[in-house]
Image: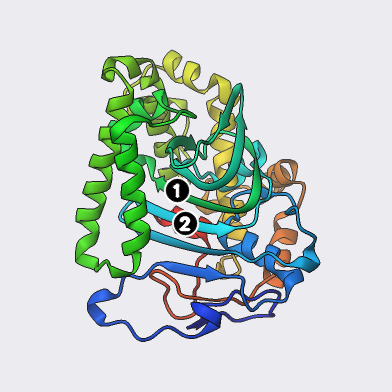
């Protein structure tokens, strides 16, 4: 059992009733993150769940009053560039705002299935009503808001790192906010059920094969929905944009990162580059947002011991005063104040954690960044 250090604000139990799991043989070192709010004081349960399991969302309070508690359980299984996630929990509303997207820079694709309960989600002009058992294609790169209703919600998702599914990007884009129906869609839903049932049985040697099988099953469902790859051809610009955004993230610390270098690295013309980034406020603005978002992540991590000037240089700001001004303008807080809040706000949790080194228990956002 892992127990973090620092002042205890909330505590999630591990396994049934907080009992420490039996030792797992060395060949089965790959273990899912399993969390439960059972054992926490009722008024702490929702906050603890939010902080560990959905820190990438802006959550509203659940329908039940805090004194009634928030009995929830969840499991996350990362493998290669994917993460399977399953949860059983009370209903609550949540959203992913543009500000949060800028802060955490998570842009993963998601294939989601609502198994029990009711969920509605709005993203731009798209309104989704999740039919039970049917997979839907979503993305963390676009803002959305969702409402959940019912006595109990059962939800499962497959998170996909964009780098791992580049060849599927046109099909994913063409299927965004849409259901994957028919025999191959049902096959995909059954595959996710199997991941849930077998999560604790996978060995390290299974994971590359599991990733290949996941990609093939997903490709079958996507191809079945789209008449052909040509039907997704208009989405190729999304693939090109995702590729350039990845280059930006990889080169954030470079002083020469700008339109000219991006054109050279990506092979697109300057006019095409500007057209791609126009909806995002321009190339230079996007680069600055990415740099500031990375700095925010580093400074809000209590384990990161670098000085503020070192963090600024690591993300491409070489003038401390200009970094501080830009950071405050973006987030409404000075870098030193964010660092102080992070150091004061450490939590203690107990979980069974996938790949958790001694002294480190990841939340779901941290797992997603490692994919």
Q: Nearer the viewer, residue 90 or 124?
A: 90
Q: Nearer the viewer, residue 227 or 53?
A: 227
Q: CA distance from mark 2 to mark 1?
A: 7 Å
Task: State whether residue 290 is above or below residue 346.
Answer: above
Q: Nearer the viewer, residue 351 or 346?
A: 351
* Left or right: 4 in relation to 75: right
Helix, strand or loop at mark 1: strand
Quarter of the rendering containing residue 149: top right
Q: Position of residue 340 (x, y in %)?
A: 72, 66
Dot label at residue 157: 1
Task: State whether residue 67 is above or below residue 16.
Answer: above
Identify the residue shown where x is 64% and y is 56%. Answer: 90
Task: State whether residue 357 is above or below residue 124.
Answer: below
Residue for badge 2: 86
Helix, strand or loop at mark 2: strand
Identify the residue shown where x is 45% and y is 55%. Answer: 85
Image marks 2 and 1: residues in contact by CB distance under 8 Å:
yes
Q: Position of residue 248 (x, y in %)?
A: 44, 38
Give the tally of numbered discs.
Answer: 2
């Amino acid at each position: 059992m892992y127990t973090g250090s620092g002042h205890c604000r909330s505590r999630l139990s591990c396994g049934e009733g907080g009992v420490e799991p039996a030792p797992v043989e060395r060949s089965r070192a790959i273990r899912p993150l399993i969390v439960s709010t059972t054992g926490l004081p009722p008024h702490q349960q929702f906050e603890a769940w939010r902080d560990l399991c959905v820190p990438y969302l802006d959550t509203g309070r659940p329908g039940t009053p805090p004194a009634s508690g928030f009995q929830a359980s969840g499991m996350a299984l990362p493998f290669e560039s994917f993460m399977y996630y399953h949860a059983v929990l009370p209903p609550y509303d949540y959203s992913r705002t543009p500000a949060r997207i800028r802060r955490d820079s998570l842009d993963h694709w998601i294939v989601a299935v609502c198994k029990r309960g009711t969920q509605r989600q709005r993203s731009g002009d798209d309104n989704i009503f999740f039919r039970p058992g049917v997979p839907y294609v979503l993305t963390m790169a676009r803002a959305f808001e969702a409402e959940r209703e019912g006595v109990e919600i059962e939800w499962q998702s497959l998170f996909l790192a964009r780098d791992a599914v580049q060849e599927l990007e046109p099909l994913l884009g063409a299927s965004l906010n849409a259901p994957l129906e028919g025999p191959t869609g049902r096959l995909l839903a059954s595959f996710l059920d199997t991941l849930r049932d077998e999560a604790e049985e996978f060995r390290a040697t299974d994971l590359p094969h599991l990733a290949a099988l996941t990609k093939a099953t997903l490709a079958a469902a996507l191809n079945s929905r789209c008449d052909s790859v040509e039907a997704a051809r208009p989405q190729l610009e999304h693939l090109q944009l995702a590729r350039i955004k990845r280059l930006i993230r990889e080169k954030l610390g470079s002083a020469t990162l700008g339109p000219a270098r991006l054109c050279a690295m990506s092979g697109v013309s300057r006019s095409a580059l500007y057209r791609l980034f126009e909806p995002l406020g321009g190339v230079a603005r996007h680069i600055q947002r990415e740099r500031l978002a990375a700095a925010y992540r580093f400074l809000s991590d209590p384990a990161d011991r670098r000085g503020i000037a070192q963090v600024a240089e690591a993300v491409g700001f070489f003038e401390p005063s200009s970094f501080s001004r830009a950071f405050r303008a973006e987030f409404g807080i000075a870098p030193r104040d964010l660092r102080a809040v992070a150091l004061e706000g450490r939590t203690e949790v107990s979980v069974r954690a996938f790949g958790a080194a001694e002294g480190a228990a990841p939340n779901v956002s941290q797992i997603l960044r490692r994919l």
